[in-house]
């Protein structure tokens, strides 16, 4: 079994798990949750091949699932065989929930998203956009990289990568981003080993552009690991100045250091520290560079991650609605705390990879209501025309997988004017 097929099966089942479970339960007398985890997953794998993979013969999908059940839990092999064959026979006669009468249930089942999330999106975006967002989340995301401009220009990198991929194209907004089709074993590429690029979604690349870091500035990057934005900031600074990078994870700090080394970035200074708890005393631990405040601060805040579930489809089944409000509390603490360390005239960029207003606009607007010394700064100036359409009337950035192939990010650029 080749790697591409295994990847398709694993990610396909994770994306379509809700739909698959609903279908399977139509042909069993007990809820799927009462089956053992092993049989549950064998049924999901079999049903996914039957319903989504035309290239797999029906007999092969059923027989392989039965064989696997016999090897692992023999008494359930007949059950697996019966359920999958019934699904195949009745696939065109399955009564789905009525979309007009039960829109939340219909979208949740048909497009395989938890009902609580579908309900939120319908209330905020409307039915059509909620469906579009669910559909987009069930598609494989593009493979996007960022050119390391300390070592190479984008056009030169394209030439080096062409022989390794099926196709390659420029990102629509990020001037150093590239989208690759057909990459395999990316870590084996000579260009990767030489640190000529970093794997990063285009939306994430835009956050550093909004910050607009300049050479010789002093910049604080909170919640920094694994270092995508910290290294991008350093590249935009031409590796001149200082980037203080905080993170609460020792493992994350290790990844940050590894990425800096591979990319030949040496102005990033990692610190194992909680951005929400950093105090004036602790700021002294950052050395002379941290004592007089920072020119710019990036808060890529911990969040629900609902804007990137197409990359982590298991997340939509693990996350609960409470996570949004728990994250908001942390986000408010971080922005309140770190704003004290920004110089007058300095810039603070707040960003998340969440779709939810509570973690985005609400956090920024609550902060602004309590801090009249901060104002929302215009971010359209940092984009070409294709990027300006991503900025709303409040001058906030919103990206989405629906119409620009990016992850779902939010960002606001705040300037300290007093």
Image (cartoon, rainbow, N blue to C red):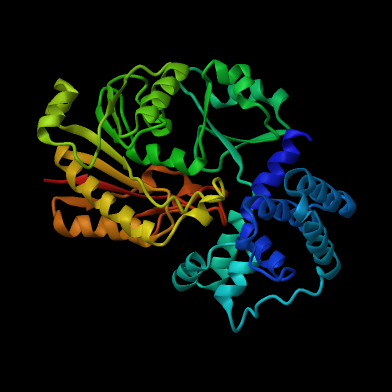
| Residue beneath the point at 19% across and 24% down | 286
| Rendering coords of residue 245 (x, y %) | 30, 29
| Residue beneath the point at 18% across and 50% down | 374
- For the C terminus, the image quarter is top left
| Residue beneath the point at 44% across and 57% down | 355
Taking 76 as reference, is 136 left or right?
left
| Rendering coords of residue 274 (x, y %) | 25, 37
| Rendering coords of residue 344 (x, y %) | 14, 39
Tally of numbered tags:
0
Taking 417 as reference, is 113 left or right?
right
**Is residue 282 in view?**
yes
Q: Which of 152 and 139 is in front in this view?
A: 139
Q: Residue furthest front?
A: 75
| Residue beneath the point at 73% across and 37% down | 4
Q: Nearer the viewer, residue 31 or 127?
A: 31
Taking 255 as reference, is 58 left or right?
right
Placement of 67 over or under 107, stated as above or below: above
**Which quadrant holds residue 141?**
top right
| Rendering coords of residue 162 (x, y %) | 69, 26
Placement of 401 over or under 156, stated as above or below: below
Q: Nearer the viewer, residue 324 or 17?
A: 17
- For the N terminus, the image quarter is top right
**Is residue 360 in view?**
no
Placement of 252 over or under 134, stated as above or below: above
């Amino acid at each position: 079994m080749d790697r591409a097929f295994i990847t398709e099966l694993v990610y396909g089942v994770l994306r379509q798990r809700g739909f698959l479970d609903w279908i399977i339960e139509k042909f069993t007398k007990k809820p799927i949750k009462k089956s053992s985890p092993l049989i549950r997953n064998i049924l999901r794998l079999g049903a996914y091949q039957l319903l989504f993979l035309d290239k797999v013969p029906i007999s092969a999908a059923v027989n392989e699932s039965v064989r696997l059940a016999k090897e692992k839990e023999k008494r359930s092999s007949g059950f697996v065989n019966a359920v999958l064959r019934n699904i195949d026979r009745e696939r065109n006669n399955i009564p789905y929930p009525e979309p007009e009468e039960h829109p939340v249930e219909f979208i949740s089942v048909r497009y395989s998203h938890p009902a609580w999330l579908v309900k939120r999106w319908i209330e905020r975006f409307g039915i059509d956009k909620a469906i579009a967002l669910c559909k987009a989340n069930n598609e494989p995301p593009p493979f996007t990289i960022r050119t390391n401009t300390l070592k190479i220009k984008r056009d030169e990198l394209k030439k080096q990568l062409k022989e390794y991929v099926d196709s390659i194209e420029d990102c629509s907004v990020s001037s150093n981003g590239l989208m690759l089709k057909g990459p395999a074993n990316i870590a084996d590429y000579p260009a990767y080993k030489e640190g000529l690029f970093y794997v990063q979604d285009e939306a994430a690349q835009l956050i550093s552009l909004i910050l607009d870091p300049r050479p010789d500035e002093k910049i604080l990057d909170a919640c920094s690991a694994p270092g995508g934005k910290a290294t991008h900031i350093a590249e935009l600074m031409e590796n001149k100045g200082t980037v203080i990078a905080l993170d609460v994870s020792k493992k994350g700090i290790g990844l940050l250091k590894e990425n800096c080394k591979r990319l030949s970035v040496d102005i990033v200074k990692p610190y194992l520290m909680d951005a929400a708890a950093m105090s004036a005393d602790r700021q002294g631990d950052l050395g002379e560079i941290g004592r007089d405040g920072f020119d710019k601060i990036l808060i890529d805040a911990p969040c629900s991650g609902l804007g990137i579930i197409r990359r982590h489809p298991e997340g939509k089944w693990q996350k609960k609605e409470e996570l949004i409000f728990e994250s908001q509390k942390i986000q408010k603490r971080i922005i309140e705390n770190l704003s004290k360390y920004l110089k007058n005239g300095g810039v603070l960029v707040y960003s998340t990879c969440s779709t939810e207003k509570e973690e985005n606009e609400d956090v920024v607007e609550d902060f602004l209501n309590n801090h009249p010394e901060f104002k929302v700064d215009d971010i359209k100036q940092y984009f070409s025309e294709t990027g300006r359409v991503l900025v709303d009337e409040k001058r906030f950035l919103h990206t989405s997988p629906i119409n620009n192939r990016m992850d779902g990010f939010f960002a606001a650029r705040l300037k300290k004017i007093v």
